[in-house]
Every structure is written in C-alpha cells, then in structure tokens.
Amino acid sequence: MPRVGHLALVLALALTACGAPTPEQSARETRALAALDWSCSTAPIGQRYDAAETRKTIGAGWDAIRQNRPMDAVELLVTAKEYGIPMQGAYWGLAVAVHMLDASLTQVRACFDRAIAFDDSQAGLFSDYARVLEERRLPSEALEKAKTALAIDPDHVEALIAAGRAEMQLGNEAAANAYAARVQALRN
C-alpha cells in the first residue's frame, strides 16, 4: 500500500475513534499524522534548541496521552522535536500515542526504537513497549520486552503485569501466576 494510502487509513481509524471531526480538526489531524510519519523515521532534529520549551511540550504531550487525546499528543510531541533538543520522552510518547491511534506496528516500533537509542536503561520504556506488543497479540515479543524491563528494575509492577499477561497468552499459567504473586507482594 502506498504511504499516502496508509496515512489515510490511520487517519480514518483515528477519526472513527474520535467521532466526526470539524473541517479544522480534520486538517489538524492530517498534519499531525503526516508529521508523525516523518518524525519517527530517521528525520533530522529541528534547529531551535530550547531545552525548557522541549520539556514543557513533552510534558503536555504525555498529559494528552493520559487524557486519551492521542492526536493532541502526536502534535505536541512532534512539535517538541522541532525545538531541537533530542529527548527520549518525545519518541517514547509518540510510540504510545501512535499505538493508541492504531498506527502500523512498523511506526510504533520506529518510535520505540528511537526512544531506546537515547537511553536503554528505563524500565518504564520497555514495560510500555511490552504492553503495546501484548495488546497487539505478540506475546513472545511482549515477554521479551517485559523481561528487559525487569532486568533493569526487578520490582517494576507494570513490567510484572505485562510479563504475566504475556505468559498467560502463551499458555504458561504457572509462570503467569508467579508474576501475579510478585505483583501482589509488592502491592501489600
């Protein structure tokens, strides 16, 4: 499928999830998706070098993710990249937001991979990657990412949950129960 067709498909999925948009929202979402497709590839970083504004915009992008506004998150996180200070949080957030928009696994992986390239010592990053893979019914890959997170932080609750869910999808009930017991012990 040509790239333009793929963007149209992603946009259609996003619009279905968000309801009927106004013409202004449609134009904004089209721009955000086009920027996303460019952003998570090997596109260069912007030239405006403003660390404070980058952090602020990344924070606003993550707020939009928590508020279930993935299109706003994409727009904010792509904008953060344009401030020119490469930060892991922008790519990490883009990975989560594009997953929320049902973008292709290739796009999601590209964003996660760029985030990992910045810093591969964040348990939360690998835990989110595991959750996304588990939600996409890729339990073996999800388990691998969850185990990477647990190697960084053995008590990372979200990674334990992701590992347990992946084990359950793989039919390993005993292993899933062991992860569940660790979560329960940490929560008590």
Image (spheres, rainbow, N blue to C red):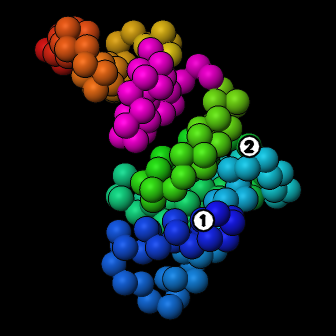
At x 65% / y 26%, what residue is drawn? 119
Residue 34 occupies quadrant: bottom right
Q: Main secondary structure of the magenta part?
A: helix
Q: Please tell me whether residue 171 is drawn above or below residue 29 in the rendered image.
A: above
Q: Position of residue 139 (x, y in %)?
A: 38, 27
From the viewer's side, name the closer residue of 45 and 98.
Answer: 98
Region in magenta: 120-147
Q: Of marks 1 and 2, which one's residue comes earlier in the chain?
A: 1
Classify mark 1: helix, strand or loop: helix
State left or right for residue 60 relative to residue 36. Answer: left
Q: Look at mark 1 in the image and give the residue it sits on.
A: 6
Q: Is residue 70 shown to the viewer in this render?
A: yes
Classify mark 2: helix, strand or loop: loop
Three-letter amino acid code of the residue under disc 2: Pro
State left or right for residue 158 relative to residue 188. Answer: right
Q: Look at mark 2 in the image and give the residue it sits on.
A: 86
Q: Residues within 10 Å of mark 2 (few under 14, many from 20)?
A: some
At x 28% / y 26%, what residue is drawn? 169
At x 70% / y 30%, what residue is drawn? 117
As drawn, which residue projects farthest toward the front? 1
At x 42% / y 84%, what residue is drawn? 21
Three-letter amino acid code of the residue under disc 1: His
